[in-house]
Amino acid sequence: MDKTTSPATQDQPKTGPTTWQKVRLATITTLVVLWIVFLLQNTEQTQVSFLWFTFATSRILLLLGTLVIGALVGAFLTYRLCVRNRKSQTKPPSFS
């Protein structure tokens, strides 16, 4: 018998992650591992002064709080830019 593939099976997309998806996953995994190592090396207490507040906290909490605030600000600004770009696009005329 001939073991060639039929035309129907040749058109099917390959399953599994692409090379760029593998690179992206490896990069994200590496950054997360490095971030965890960085956090674990900074566990001591530190004194924080902001405006009239002064308090002592773990550096891990301080770093995680900074990360969360930065992510929220970035998400908010990205959302605002998307809304602004959506409003500035010309809409096609409607025929009614």
Image (spheres, grey):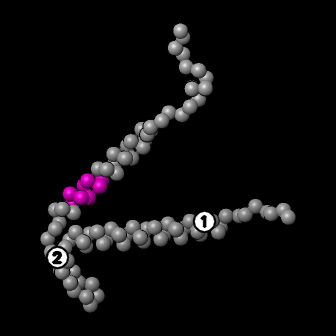
Q: Position of residue 17 (x, y in %)?
A: 43, 40
Residue 65 vs residue 12: left or right?
left
Looking at the image, how many numbered discs can be counted on the residues? 2
* Label 1: element kind: helix
Q: Which of marks 1 and 2 is nearer the N terminus?
A: 2
The amino acid beneath tag 2 is Thr
> Residue at coordinates 26% horizontally, 58% vertically from top-left?
35
| Range covered by the magenta-colored residues | 31-38
> Residue at coordinates 57% horizontally, 26% vertically from top-left?
9
Of the residues tagged 1 and 2, which is closer to the observer? 2
Q: Circle 2 sits on which residue?
A: 46
Q: In which quarter of the image is residue 95?
A: bottom right
Q: Does the magenta stretch include residue 8?
A: no
The amino acid beneath tag 1 is Asn
> Residue at coordinates 56% horizontally, 65% vertically from top-left?
82
Question: What secondary structure do most residues of the magenta stretch adopt?
Answer: helix
Cβ–Cβ under 8 Å for marks 1 and 2? no
Q: Can you name the residue that lies furthest to the bottom here?
A: 52
Q: Circle 1 sits on which residue?
A: 85
83 or 16: which is nearer to us? 16
Residue 91 vs residue 24: left or right?
right
Distance, label 1 to label 2, CA atoms, is: 43 Å
* Label 2: element kind: strand
Q: Where is residue 89 in the image (x, y as percent from the top left)?
A: 67, 64
